[in-house]
Image: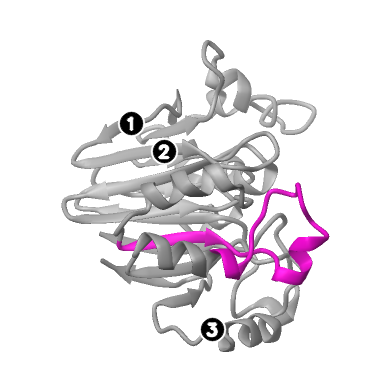
Amino acid sequence: MLLKVLGTRGSMATNRADQAIYGRATSCYMVRAGEETVFLDAGNGLLAAPVEFPHPPHILLSHLHLDHVIGLGMYPRLVRRDLETFIHVPAPRGEDPGNILERVYSPPFWPVSLSSYAGDVRILPLSFPFQIGELTVEGIPGCHPGCSYIIKLSWRDKSIVYASDYEYEKDSFLRLIELAKDVDLVLYDGQYSSDELKSHKGFGHSSVNYALELLDRCGARFMWIVHHHPQRTDAELDAMAARILRKNVHFTREGDEIVL
């Protein structure tokens, strides 16, 4: 099971030279499990993704904020007539997920809808649990304005939990601990420092301190901090990382890979 970081910047893509090391593209993580491919979110990091795969890829959207879907519009695979792609959209029961996604991808905000692209774009509701070949996808609601889902991928004896755009809340944190119990890797929202978090309650993001608490309580092998603040420089992230004296905690950089 391989995970590659295509984008890990939070809230908005940036173009600053002092952010090149950790990356400037927004949330997108590619997971390869055998011949299956899953993308966790579709920020503009998706533009760095391959186009050809053994089986059609599945794009799982944790929520529909712009920084997590902005890459869909220009992903080359979606305009290839011979290629099929599945996009799983969080949708209230009974609502058409395609209609929800078209609120972003339709005029006047985008020239055309994704359903009109030349590729075979299949838009499905994100509903847990489900299977993609041997890969099991589970999920629980997180704590974020408008709701964002925490997603768990399990393949054979390996597992990953993706908890971006998540703000600590006691009951949901307990559910997250249970979901992440003994997993191999947790991707956790560390947008704010503990001091910044005090003045950003309700913004839907978390801190490194809560990431460490989750790691201690769930027993994951690795904790990767994601969704870096859009104003945070490489030097500032280096300084934050240097204060964490744990070899299994990593501040995620665009281009990072891990094989589990």
Front-most of 123 and 180? Answer: 180
Measured along the vertical axis of the image, is residue 131 above or below residue 24?
above
Q: Which residue is mark 1?
A: 129
Asked if the residue at tag 2 contacts the one at tag 3, i.e. Cβ–Cβ closer than 8 Å, the answer is no
- What span is colored magenta in the figure? 184-210
Q: Residue furthest right?
A: 199
Amino acid carrying mark 2 in the image: Gly
Residue 251 in the image: state x and y as whole percent.
Answer: 53, 75
Front-most of 13 and 156? Answer: 156
Helix, strand, or loop for circle 2?
strand
Residue at x 75%, y 26% (from the top left corner): 107
Report, in whole angstroms, how far the alpha carbon at label 1 lies from the one at label 2. Answer: 7 Å
Residue 85 in the image: state x and y as whole percent.
Answer: 40, 35
Q: Which residue is mark 2?
A: 139
Residue 50 in the image: state x and y as whole percent.
Answer: 40, 55
Asked if the residue at tag 2 contacts the one at tag 1, i.e. Cβ–Cβ closer than 8 Å, the answer is yes
Query: Who comes first in sequence, dot 3 or dot 2?
Result: 2
Q: Residue furthest top?
A: 94
Amino acid carrying mark 1 in the image: Pro
Report, in whole angstroms, how far the alpha carbon at label 3 lies from the one at label 2. Answer: 29 Å
Amino acid carrying mark 3 in the image: Ile
Residue at x 80%, y 28% (from the top left corner): 108
- Which of pointers 1 and 3 indicates the residue nearer the eye? 3
Any part of residue 50 in sight: no
Residue 171 in the image: state x and y as whole percent.
Answer: 54, 42
Measured along the vertical axis of the image, is residue 255 above or below residue 37?
below
Q: Quadrant of the N terminus?
A: bottom left
Q: Which residue is mark 3?
A: 244
Can you tell which quarter of the image residue 158 is in?
Answer: bottom left
